């Protein structure tokens, strides 16, 4: 069982806010609403809820509980199960680092838009609506022709990226004590802002038409595999599982902390935020449709285009409070990104490094942030969006899902799902039964492999991802590099067998 003397969140609510903040991220705003619209409205919600309880909550519970049981980050957890399994913990750790390098760049775009909203830099009224796309792709990104044409650095993005990493450094350099306090403030403010944005969006003309598209029910989609793939993949992305960090957050839970309650609260708050964001987004989409006299197919409602093209269009067209709404929206966007970014940095890859090598926390924090910033410069080039998309497909899809499936199999069959359940029940008011063993050993790994194969591998075999041609092969190359690096790190010697020298 675990060693004593490790850092903890000062209060239980700090841990809950930190976990909620790590789960709620950019995908809650720009991916969940689109999935709900595309896959039958309430039918997608039904599939999502089923997937949440069948895969998402068991997966999250597993990571919290294993970190709490062994009091270690992901690599330490799997090393404790068996030396040969340590690489299973490094696989998501490396993925967390790679995700953070481009996630912070998206936050940099958000900062630029927060200030741009003050002057409506992309233009006001219908003129601004038609110029919003050019402003993002040409002015902000300076997008080149292909991944091969890196072009120069976009210096406003570099500056915003540097600021973002500096903030992350000051949040995490003192560890869980400060992370918990900051998370409470950040997430409370994010909820207030999304509520204010929602109220503003619902009062716009045409908002109801947008909501009708958002919640239009088509139960027939449940017969196909597409809706289940979409729901399961969104759950994995949204809960921040498979990124190593939840093991570290689990270790920060107090000895008698309620693991099951913490898991359920985190999962349900994450889902609620995404659902509310969908109301705000589609209310605005409905307003755009009415103001411009266009149909839904003419409005971009997915991916980066939703946040950085469509919403600015809505801001340009708003008759009143457009600048204020824009500032609040992008501030909210940056805050939910921040809570995920410092989670990925500290819990995702810095805690495992401190565990493994006994490095000083402040030094690891400094160098971890600096290296993350330097690698992030790739995404600040004129080809940055292409490389961001390619790397995201690799680490936030394939390595996340496959790594999660392998981890679940190791925990369920090697460590023992029944042993995990006993530990969870010893700390929690809500008891889980033997059915949880079946979910961890069978349902979670099968579901994740289904998503990776059906929604990813089979599609990418038919046609190179993203239309990048031979450049899409970087997906497979990077996956192999991550796997090799995981085994290399496994082969390195532990200092004091993972006892951490934080103080």
Image (tube, rainbow, N blue to C red):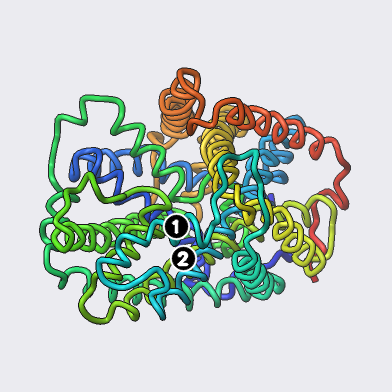
Q: Quadrant of residue 374?
A: bottom right
Q: CA distance from mark 1 to mark 2?
A: 7 Å
| Residue 406 percent coordinates (x, y) | 58, 30
Q: Residue at x 49, y 56 (%)?
A: 138
Compared across the picture, whether 186 is left or right of 345 comes to left
Q: Residue at x 35, y 75 (%)?
A: 193
Asked if 169 appears above or below 482 in the picture, the reply is below
The reply to whether callout 1 and callout 2 are in contact (CB within 8 Å) is: yes
Number of other residues with Cα within 10 Å of mark 2, as a class: few under 14, some 14 to 19, many 20 or more: many
| Residue 55 percent coordinates (x, y) | 40, 38
- Secondary structure under tag 2 reads helix
Q: Residue at x 43, y 52 (%)?
A: 304
Provide the residue designation for mark 2: 336
Number of other residues with Cα within 10 Å of mark 1, as a class: few under 14, some 14 to 19, many 20 or more: many
Q: Residue at x 50, y 50 (%)?
A: 240
- Quadrant location of the C terminus? bottom right
- The numbered mark at residue 105 is none
């Amino acid at each position: 069982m675990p060693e004593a003397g490790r850092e903890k969140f000062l209060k239980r609510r700090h841990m809950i806010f930190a976990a909620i903040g790590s789960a709620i991220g950019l995908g809650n705003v720009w991916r969940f609403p689109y999935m709900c619209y595309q896959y039958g409205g309430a039918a997608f919600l039904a599939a999502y809820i089923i997937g949440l309880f069948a895969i998402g909550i068991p997966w999250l519970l597993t990571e919290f509980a294993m970190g709490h049981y062994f009091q270690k980050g992901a690599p330490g957890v799997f090393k404790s199960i068996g030396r040969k399994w340590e690489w299973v913990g490094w696989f998501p750790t490396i993925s967390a680092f790679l995700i953070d390098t481009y996630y912070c760049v998206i936050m940099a775009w958000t900062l630029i838009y927060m200030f741009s909203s003050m002057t409506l830099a992309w233009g006001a009224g219908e003129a601004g609506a038609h110029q919003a796309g050019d402003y993002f792709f040409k002015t902000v990104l300076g997008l080149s022709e292909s991944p091969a044409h890196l072009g120069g650095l976009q210096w406003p993005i570099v500056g915003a990226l540097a600021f973002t990493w500096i903030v992350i450094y000051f949040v995490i350099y003192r560890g869980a004590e400060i992370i918990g306090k900051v998370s409470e403030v950040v997430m409370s403010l994010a909820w207030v802002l999304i509520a204010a944005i929602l109220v503003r969006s619902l009062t716009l003309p045409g908002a109801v038409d947008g909501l009708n598209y958002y919640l239009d029910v088509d139960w027939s989609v449940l017969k196909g595999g597409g809706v289940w793939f979409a729901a399961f993949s969104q759950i994995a992305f949204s809960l921040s599982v498979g990124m190593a960090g939840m093991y570290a957050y689990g270790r920060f839970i107090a000895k008698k902390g309620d693991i099951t309650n913490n898991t359920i609260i985190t999962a349900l708050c994450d889902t609620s935020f995404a659902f509310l964001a969908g109301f705000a987004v589609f209310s605005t989409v409905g307003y755009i449709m009415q103001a411009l006299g266009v149909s839904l197919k003419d409005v971009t409602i997915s991916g980066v285009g939703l946040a950085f093209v469509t919403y600015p269009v809505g801001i340009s067209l708003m008759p009143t409070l457009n600048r204020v709404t824009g500032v609040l929206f992008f501030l909210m966007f940056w805050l939910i990104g921040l809570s995920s970014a410092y989670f990925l940095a500290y819990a995702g890859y810095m805690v495992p490094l401190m565990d493994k090598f006994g490095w000083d926390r402040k030094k690891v924090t400094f160098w971890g942030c600096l290296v993350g910033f330097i690698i992030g410069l790739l995404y600040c080039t004129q080809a940055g969006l292409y490389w961001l998309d390619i790397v995201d497909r690799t680490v936030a899809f394939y390595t996340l899902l496959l790594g999660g499936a392998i981890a679940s199999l190791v925990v369920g069959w090697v460590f023992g799902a029944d042993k995990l359940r006993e530990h969870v029940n010893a700390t929690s008011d809500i008891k889980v039964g033997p059915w949880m063993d079946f979910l961890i050993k069978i349902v979670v790994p099968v579901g994740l492999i289904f998503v990776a194969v059906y929604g990813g591998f089979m599609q990418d075999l038919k046609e190179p991802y993203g239309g990048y041609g031979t450049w899409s092969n970087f997906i497979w190359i990077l996956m192999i590099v991550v796997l090799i690096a995981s085994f290399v790190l496994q082969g390195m010697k532990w200092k004091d067998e993972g006892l951490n020298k934080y103080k």
